[in-house]
Image: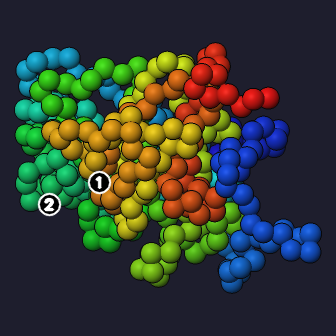
Amino acid sequence: MTHTTTRRQVLQTAGIGGTMALAGCIGGPPRSNNVQASPLQLQTEEELDLAKPVDVDRVAADPRDIPAPITRTTPETVSVELETLEQVAEIEPGVTFTAMTFNGQIPGPFIRTRVGDTVDLTIRNHEDNSMVHNVDFHACRGPGGGAEATNVEPGEEAHLRFKVTFPGAFVYHCAVANVDYHISSGMYGIILVEPEEGLPKVDHEFYLGQHELYTNGKTGQEGHHKFDFDRMAMEDPTYVLINGEKHAITPDNYAEMNVKTGETARIFYGVGGPNQLSSFHPIGSVWDEVWEQGALASEPMRYVQTTPVLPGSACVATMSFPVPGTFKLVDHALSRVARKGALAAITAEGPENTDVFDPLD
């Protein structure tokens, strides 16, 4: 695919927004002798190849791309098609990496089912790929969560049927040899199994995923980054990403999570890992409800400031918006936000509510 100027590059060139300003209390590196210290100077320089032409202009999943809540009262067969793709994508302007994806997006497609449904899966490994892929569903009772039945060589496809018998939000991911490499490169997503009675009504639903990426470059170093197995073994990621790109789902970039004051939102948050948990926190608010581990059969926790989401797990959380503003969703291991990219944001528009929040200007 011919490289084209991305929307994010246009915004940065125009000076619109400013992601570090968006991060609020999170500042840049300290200054010394009036010269800003760069994180890139703190590590040994390694020459990188030039950034490659991208195969896909955007790898970040649209957080709004979620099937509608299920209203039927009887089980059905849900057809799911997954295509594994190895594609050069941009992590941030000037930084490319060969991502591995389901259907060309990170996280992979949101799959929505109901207890008692049967998933009828077709998985295809694109003929231009170089590696074997498969998929392991944490919602599947069966060897490898289906991984053993879905191994596909480049150019092949496989089929699997399984019944979802318990409710919750569950991660799925590629589970071949070097499973950590494939997940770190983007191969994970969420399958939701709604309880028979469905989920409480909300005004909006959003879908986000976090993973860490290990490369031979430094964070922000322009060029084409290759995967670094030694860094992964040390669990020292170059990037920690929400939806596969640095600060992707923010007003600076893909400004797609927008609500009005007085509305409610449900967030499905999956952590592919492969190694690090997320301390998921909404800056300027709390989670009104949290179903930890995506355990929808359990009672939710209420008014939670920060909830842990383990690698290979998910949470379902709701929040409300009594006042307008931009509400940052972060991993509260805050160096991952300020240095490595783990930031998303919801923008609420509407009248001020000085009874709740009054800046006293």
Furthest residue toward right = 34
When the figure is inspected, residue 248 is found, relative to residue 130, above or below; the finding is above
Residue type, numbered disc 2: Gly
The mark tally for this picture is 2
Residue 144 got which mark? 2
Mark 2 or mark 1: whose residue is earlier in sequence: 2
Question: Within the image, what quadrant is residue 274 found in?
Answer: bottom left
Horizontal placement of 65 versus 283: left or right? left
- Mark 2: few, some, or many residues within 10 Å (few <14, many ≥20)? some
Viewer-proximal residue among 31 and 210: 31
Which callout, 2 or 1, points to the residue nearer the camera?
Answer: 1
Q: Which residue is mark 1?
A: 313
**Residue 194 in the image: x percent, y percent?**
19, 32
Residue type, numbered disc 1: Ser
Q: What's the residue at 69%, 84% (across, down)?
A: 44
Viewer-proximal residue among 263 and 343: 263
Q: What's the residue at 38%, 39% (across, down)?
A: 303
Horizontal placement of 102 versus 76: left or right? right
Local SS, label 1 = strand
When the figure is inspected, residue 213 is found, relative to residue 299, above or below; the finding is below
Q: What's the residue at 8%, 51% (across, down)?
A: 141
